[in-house]
Amino acid sequence: MFIGRHPDLLSQYEKTLQLLEMNPGHPSLRLQKLTGRLDGLYSVSINMIYIISLEFIIDEDTVIPVTVGTHDETYRNG
């Protein structure tokens, strides 16, 4: 699990999820639609190294985190 490997990022991770819930368009999230193998998913930044790839289910106003990791980890595992 990501937080188990990076406990120092717990507060940044939680802050990112809270901000995503309050304002998905906030500039610091750097929300972007993914393409290629990850088409249909989006990503938001935890910081300059780590991102969360996620799925938006618009009908239910639900956001489902899919993976958390560096850009390379996310795109390699996606």
Image (spheres, rainbow, N blue to C red):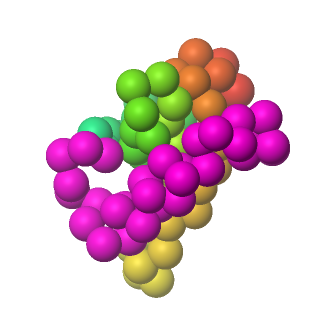
18, 25: nearer the viewer: 18
Please tell me which residue is depicted at 31% across the width and 46% down the height of the picture. Answer: 29
38, 72: nearer the viewer: 72
**Is residue 74 magenta-colored?**
no
Judge left or right: residue 43 versus residue 8: left
Return the x and y of residue 62 as percentages of the image width and height: 49, 74
Judge left or right: residue 70 versus residue 39: right
Judge left or right: residue 24 versus residue 5: left
Which corner quadrant of the image does residue 44 belong to?
top left
In this orientation, does residue 25 appear? Answer: yes
11, 48: nearer the viewer: 11
Above or below — where is 78 with respect to 66? above
Please tell me which residue is depicted at 62% across the width and 31% down the height of the picture. Answer: 69
Judge left or right: residue 24 versus residue 11: left
Return the x and y of residue 24 as percentages of the image width and height: 29, 61
Return the x and y of residue 74 as percentages of the image width and height: 60, 28
Which corner quadrant of the image does residue 56 belong to?
bottom left
**Is residue 10 magenta-colored?**
yes
Return the x and y of residue 2 as percentages of the image width and height: 73, 41
Magenta stretch: helix, strand or loop mostly: helix
In this orientation, does residue 39 appear? Answer: no
Tag count: 0
Magenta stretch, residue numbers: 1-29
Please tell me which residue is depicted at 25% across the width and 44% down the height of the picture. Answer: 28
Query: In which quadrant is the C terminus drawn?
Result: top right
Above or below — where is 65 with respect to 35? below
